[in-house]
Amino acid sequence: FLLAIYPFSFFMVMGYTESLFICLTAAALYYYRTGRPWLAGIFALLSGLTRVQGLMIITYFLAEYVQSRDWHSKRRLIPILLAPLGTLIFIGYQWLYLGSPLAFIEAQTLWGKFSDDYLASLFATVNPITLSAFFLFIALIVITYRQLSKTLAFYAVCSLLLAVLPGSLISLNRYILSSFPLFLGLALVYQRLKKPYQASIILWWITLSIAF
């Protein structure tokens, strides 16, 4: 519900990859947590084919593997090995048909990303909206850490780092939307709030949705 009324959830009904990406990533995490590593790996692979952010799911699998200390478990290695294949296939496709394995990065320069002056490029995108998104991202990571798990919080941190890597804050709200575990932690906090506070959050987010 909170994901649906998030002010930037309109990206899920536009010509963007968010809705498919969220579906595939959710499936990967679900099958991993229910002990089906092959399915988790396959959906993680498809997630990486959908968008580059899908590569970040490997950080969750790695964190879970390290946290379990079950170094001899081959089952836990399956999704770790499969997850990056989606991104590698996409890179190979670009190399074959576009002549450059990093064409998706080169295209980002048209939006002023991956500039030679990283800090200047980053600060040029700072405005009330992007700054609010950055602090919201941090707050949701803290909530995820406290309400869910360290591994999901680590996955969210890696997604945040990937979002700012190009030297731009413009897409932060889309990365928040795609990092759906953040909304699971928020939901746990939301359901413990008194109804007036719940109504305030809903009204605030709906108002922002209309504004954008």
Image (cartoon, rainbow, N blue to C red):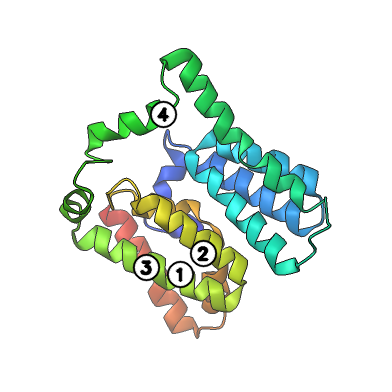
Q: CB under 8 Å between callouts 4 and 2?
A: no
Q: Residue at x 40, y 47 (%)?
A: 10
Which residue does the numbered mark 2 point to in the structure image?
182
Q: Residue at x 64, y 62 (%)?
A: 63
Q: CB under 8 Å between callouts 1 and 3?
A: yes
Q: CB under 8 Å between callouts 2 and 1?
A: yes
Q: Is residue 159 left or right of residue 85?
A: left
Q: Which mark is residue 102?
A: 4
Q: Secondary structure at mark 1?
A: helix
Which residue does the numbered mark 3 point to in the structure image?
136
Residue depth check, mark 1 versus mark 4: number of the one nearer the observer: 4
Residue 40 appears in the rendering: no
Q: Amino acid at mark 1?
A: Leu
Counting residues from the start of the chain, the first of labels 2 and 3 encountered is 3
Q: Residues within 10 Å of mark 4 (few under 14, many from 20)?
A: some
Counting residues from the start of the chain, the first of labels 2 and 1 encountered is 1
Residue depth check, mark 4 versus mark 2: number of the one nearer the observer: 4
> What whole-number distance in Å separates the C-alpha atoms at marks 1 and 3?
6 Å
